[in-house]
Image (spheres, rainbow, N blue to C red):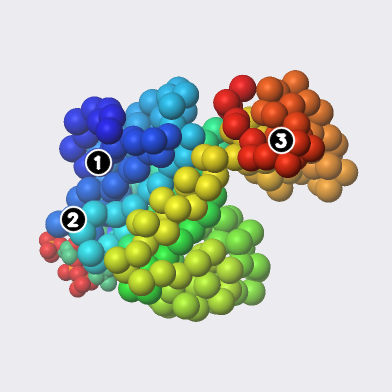
């Protein structure tokens, strides 16, 4: 087990190629203040550089919340300019998470509201405990979502469903989140982390270069028109043939054995 640094609002351990980030401000239901966001920004830089980490899981401490949003106490007295800067910083950290080279699984263990729902949406894949609740309650506070919610929610669940959640501020449970495509899978609370681990282990067992290129192709492609996206895919497809894992993966298939990937 590799413990990276002592953060005040985060716990981080990596083991067997899997990094586990736990947002850790349980008294404030893991609400995102500037200090936590700065620590997360720093940790993501460390993880991006760490060749031993091949997949990441993000979860919340305690049994109640994943993240109950951006810190309302900190936002209460912001000026317009300061609000814009706070929003831009959160967006920057979440963009960094979304574009981390390694795949990221959100294990949503409880409330994922406002910035918490936005954090989950910046992850590649979302698993939810049966106790999880999702929502963008910002309009009840007189603001709009500021960490990407107005953009990532419609891209994940479609414009109409996103607008309903954004305009009403309603919370939905894990089953409804699953039904509308906001989460990939719902598990009993005590099986959430093991389900996330099992998925991460499966991903880690695949060809690392190919997994990273899949992530880049999906993320970059969704910002392009289809013709440009498939052209980008062709480049990543070609690049795979420069990897040892492509040779191993195809040789193993032909020889009817399991591949032994090296991540090269
Ligand atoms: N910011 C700061 N503190 C928060 C918080 C938040 N977003 N959410 C919860 N807390 C704090 C509470 O103030 C409380 O602290 P105290 O014990 O010191 O009073 C503690 O966490 C426990 O919360 P509650 O007593 O409220 O717990 P509950 O079980 O009664 O309710 C809840 C749980 C429904 C999640 C409720 O806490 C809640 O509605 N939280 C706010 C949710 C919200 O509006 N999130 C959006 C924030 S705006 C945003 O995120 C903007 C953006 O897009 C960037």
Q: Residue at x 58, y 27 (%)?
A: 263
Q: Residue at x 63, y 59 (%)?
A: 155
Q: Quadrant of residue 8?
A: top left
Q: Residue at x 81, y 28 (%)?
A: 238
Q: Quadrant of the N terminus?
A: top left
- Pick the residue in front: 193 or 79: 193
Q: Residue at x 54, y 64 (%)?
A: 184
Q: Quadrant of residue 156?
A: bottom right
Which is more foreground, mark 2 or mark 1? 1
Residue 254 horizontal side relative to residue 137, left or right: right
Image position of 104 with respect to 142: above or below? above
Quickly name the residue at label 3: 252
Counting residues from the start of the chain, the first of labels 3 and 1 encountered is: 1
Give x and y (percent) for residue 10.
Answer: 25, 41
Counting residues from the start of the chain, the first of labels 3 and 2 encountered is: 2
Q: Identify the element where label 1 is drawn.
A: strand
- Pick the residue in front: 45 or 143: 45
Q: Quadrant of residue 172?
A: bottom left
In the rendering, which numbered label is found on residue 11? Answer: 1
Work out whether residue 213 can be spotted: no
Counting residues from the start of the chain, the first of labels 2 and 1 encountered is: 1
Give x and y (percent) for residue 94.
Answer: 46, 43
Which residue sits furthest right? 227
Q: CA distance from mark 3 to mark 1?
A: 39 Å
Quickly name the residue at label 2: 26
Q: Identify the element where label 3 is drawn.
A: helix
Q: CA distance from mark 3 to mark 2?
A: 47 Å
């Amino acid at each position: 087990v590799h413990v990276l640094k002592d953060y005040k609002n985060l716990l981080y351990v990596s083991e067997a190629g899997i990094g586990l980030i736990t947002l850790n401000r349980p008294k404030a239901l893991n609400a995102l203040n500037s200090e936590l966001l700065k620590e997360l920004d720093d940790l993501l830089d460390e993880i991006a550089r760490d060749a031993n980490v091949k997949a990441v899981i993000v979860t919340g401490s305690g049994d109640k919340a994943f993240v109950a949003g951006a810190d309302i106490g900190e936002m209460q007295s912001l000026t317009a300019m300061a609000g814009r800067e706070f929003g831009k910083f959160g967006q920057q950290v979440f963009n960094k998470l979304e574009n981390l080279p390694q795949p990221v699984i959100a294990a949503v263990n409880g409330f994922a509201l406002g910035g918490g729902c936005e954090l989950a949406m910046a992850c590649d894949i979302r698993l939810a405990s049966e106790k999880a609740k999702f929502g963008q309650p910002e309009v009840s506070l007189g603001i709009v979502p500021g960490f990407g919610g107005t953009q990532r929610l419609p891209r994940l669940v479609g414009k109409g469903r996103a607008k309903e959640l954004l305009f009403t501020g309603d919370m939905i449970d894990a089953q409804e989140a699953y039904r509308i495509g906001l989460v990939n899978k719902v598990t009993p609370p005590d099986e959430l982390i093991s389900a996330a681990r099992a998925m991460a282990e499966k991903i880690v067992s695949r060809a690392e270069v190919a997994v990273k290129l899949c992530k880049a192709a999906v993320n970059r492609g969704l910002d392009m028109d289809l013709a440009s996206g498939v052209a980008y895919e062709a480049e990543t497809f070609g690049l795979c043939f420069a990897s040892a894992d492509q040779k191993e993966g195809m040789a193993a298939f032909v020889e009817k054995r399991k591949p032994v990937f090296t991540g090269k």
